[in-house]
Amino acid sequence: MANQLVADPPTYTPQFNENSGKFEDNSSFVKRERKFIQYKCSCKSGTLFSGYSQWKNHIKSKTHQEYIVNYEKNNKEVDDLKIEKNDLLAKNGVLENKILNLENKNKTLTDQNEKLNEIKTIVWRRIIQKNHLLNLLNDCDK
């Protein structure tokens, strides 16, 4: 049996209302939609909902209402740090790819320099051989 990766459902987060200055629940669901995504909510461990009606029932619960009221004090900082962590991980991945590319280019240049040095050595040997042959020819002519 092959191992399959199963992603955790996305976490539902309330949206900030600039007019009221508070966090509010905004549905990401469409009423009577058949294909929906399952979300988890941080207000209580293990809370999952999918679909508009489940979301609507969930946000009416006392636990969720208290969660929304205290969201900025308790959870906003953690959520922001998670987002920042994911951004930093993505940037780190990009930088690691750049490092690998530079290392590959450096290796290629090093290989090319080694080949160039080998060619120089061969050319110098040939020049020395040519000079010896010329000296031998000159000695034979005398």
Image: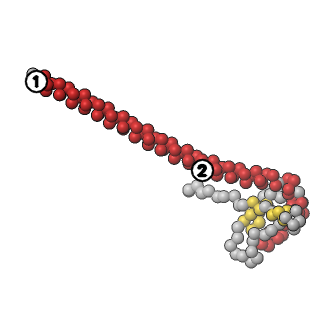
Q: Residue at 13% across / 22% down in the picture?
A: 139
**Residue beneath label 1, please?**
140
Amino acid type at circle 2 is Val
Q: Is residue 2 visible?
A: yes
**Residue beneath label 2, please?**
94
Residue 106 spot, x, y in % from top left: 48, 41
Furthest residue to the front? 142
Tell me which label, 1 or 2, sits earlier in the chain.
2
Q: Residue at 77% across / 53% down in the picture?
A: 80
Furthest residue to the bottom? 32
Seen in the image, is 65 located left or right of residue 11? Answer: right
Q: Secondary structure at mark 2?
A: helix
Q: Secondary structure at mark 1?
A: helix
Seen in the image, is 131 located left or right of residue 23? Answer: left
Identify which residue, 42 or 119, lies in the foreground: 119
62 to 96, vertically: above or below: below
Q: Residue at 89% across / 60% down in the picture?
A: 69
